[in-house]
Amino acid sequence: MKPTSKRLQGVVLPLVLIIGLLLSAGIFTFVRRSIVDGILVANRDNGAAAMALARGGVQIGTAVLYQQRYSSQIQAMEGRDPGATLDDFWAQIRHSNLTTEWGGSLVIEIEDAGARLNLNSLVPHAVPNEEGEVSAESQASEDTEEFLVELLRKIISEIPPNSGEELVYDERELARNLIDYLDADDVAINGRNENDYYLSQNPPHSQANGPILSMEEVAMIEGFDARLAEAMKPYITVYPLFGEEGINLNTAPSHVLSLIYHGSSGDMRLASEAMVGDIMQARETDRFVCSQTESDPDKCISLTEVGLGEGGIFPPVTLPQVSLVFKITSRGEVNQVAKTVEAVIDLTNRESPQLLSWKSN
Ligand SMILES: [Ca+2]
């Protein structure tokens, strides 16, 4: 028996070890799974709470904007409304980090649509009637093409090229394609049918012949691509869809101010660095470009004072520059899980805001 017992011992020991190993591996897997499940549940709870916070932030942002609209009306009655400026409470709110008792935090950032160039302002669009019909033709002005060529040249020159790659874009062709995409007719500037290109795509689609609805759509325009559309994003908006107002001199960041196209029709140019510097410097000292230079001389400086007094500005600027469309970016964070909501809100209706876009992640 002894030899058998010895043999058995010889087998049992490795078996015990293997079973032990399997058990410990099983326990380890089980423990790991329960930890991972626990983390998943916690993350899901944190994520849901962070998203709820972010959504709430959009409501707070909207309320702040309505409050601003109300106080602007009072200022306007007193003849001292400078329009939307970075002195407004909605613009300052990004500096406040709101926290909850249970460890959540919320940061809300609001930008007016005027802080970027509205692509849809370049070609006049007839606003649809109540039946949704658009009858009037829309055509770009003579300055539109030249402006777009300058704008695209500037943006393309700033795209960092991939190693050894040469960027091949034809700015004039792009400018014409963009105008054709926006204007009401189907006849391209060079006489061909605009549809030829779009119907040959996979899947076939057609040009907007009206406002562009999102920045993603820009990449679908003939000659444009995702990289160029991405490079345009910091400069461009598509809101308001039927807006005609130019860049807001009092809210646009300096890189957008450099797109201000000014001078006499047929002889216009982009803003110089000095001009952008003057506008930014005025802002530093709480002064704004506005029309009430007599009723509010401490705050208001004229277009002439920033070098924009002669000729015109394209797209045109009306003082005071009132903004009714805003992008609210609301970021909620709970236990290091963050959720962001980006909402574009139109406040044209005094009673209820219209939601133009909602993105969350
Ligand atoms: Ca067209």
Image (tube, grey):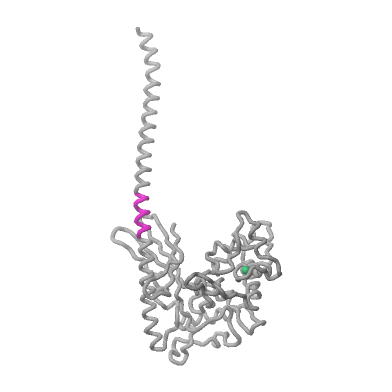
Q: Main secondary structure of the magenta part?
A: helix
Q: Nearer the viewer, residue 55 or 270?
A: 55
Residue drawn at x 60%, y 64% is: 207
* Quadrant into which the N terminus falls: top left
Check the picture and name the quadrant holding the C terminus: bottom left
Q: The magenta stretch spans which residues?
A: 42-52
Q: Quadrant of residue 360?
A: bottom left
Q: Position of residue 5 (x, y in %)?
A: 35, 11
228 left or right of 284 in image: right
Give the percent coordinates (x, y) of residue 115.
50, 73
At which x and y percent is residue 95?
40, 70
Image quadrant, ligand 1: bottom right
Q: Residue 112: x percent and y percent?
A: 46, 73
Q: Looking at the rendering, which quadrant does residue 201 occupy?
A: bottom right
- Farthest residue to the top: give it: 1
Is residue 46 one of those drawn in magenta?
yes
> 296 or 240: which is nearer to us?
240
* Residue 157 seen in the current view: no
- In the image, residue 303 above or below residue 64: below
| Residue at 37% across, 80% down | 71
